[in-house]
Amino acid sequence: MSKFRYFLLLLFVSTVVNYIILWYQESYDLLAWINSTFFTGAFILGPGLLIFVANSGALGTITFFVQKGILILIRHPKRHEMNFYIYQAMRNIVPPYSYLFMFIIGGSNIAVMFILLGIYYVQ
């Protein structure tokens, strides 16, 4: 999938989620827009953060040793074949634009929420 199509897909999902939350609240006032933009921003930003952490390999060591410990406990034949360096080399790397677009769209939703929140408290 191209970068532009991925960006448009995330933008479409963000808009659809925003309007689903507005429909669920049965209200279209300013406070409902604040709630829906915050939820949409968190809905897009959260998985982006998880993909970023998983892609950086920060939790790879913990995941490897937990998996190795479980294989040792259940006496699986593959328990001796596993090597940490091979495990690190075999993991899937997600292209950086996927989580960067999530950060951009989720962050813009959160920014719009703070702008609307400022307008709400000024009124």
Image: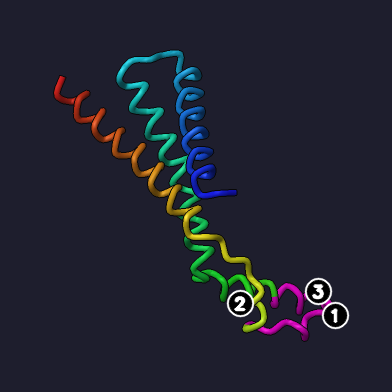
- Dot 2 crowding, Cα within 10 Å, few <14, some 14–19, many 20+: few
Residue stretch in magenta:
68-84
**Quarter of image, res 79:** bottom right
Three-letter code for the amino acid on which mark 1 is drawn: Pro
- In this image, 12 relative to 110: left or right? right
The residue wearing badge 1 is 77
Three-letter code for the amino acid on which mark 3 is drawn: Ile
Residue at horizontal 53 percent and vertical 42 percent from the top: 5
Give the SS element for disc 1.
helix
- Residue 81 on the magenta segment: yes
The residue wearing badge 3 is 74
Q: CA distance from mark 1 to mark 2?
A: 20 Å
Q: CA distance from mark 3 to mark 2?
A: 23 Å
Q: Nearer the viewer, residue 118 or 1?
A: 1
Q: Give the number of marks.
A: 3
Given the current orientation, which residue lies at the most extreme left position?
Answer: 122
Q: State the image coordinates of residue 46 (x, y, percent, origin top left).
A: 46, 48
Residue at horizontal 49 percent and vertical 38 percent from the top: 8
Q: State the image coordinates of residue 10 (x, y, percent, origin top left).
A: 50, 40
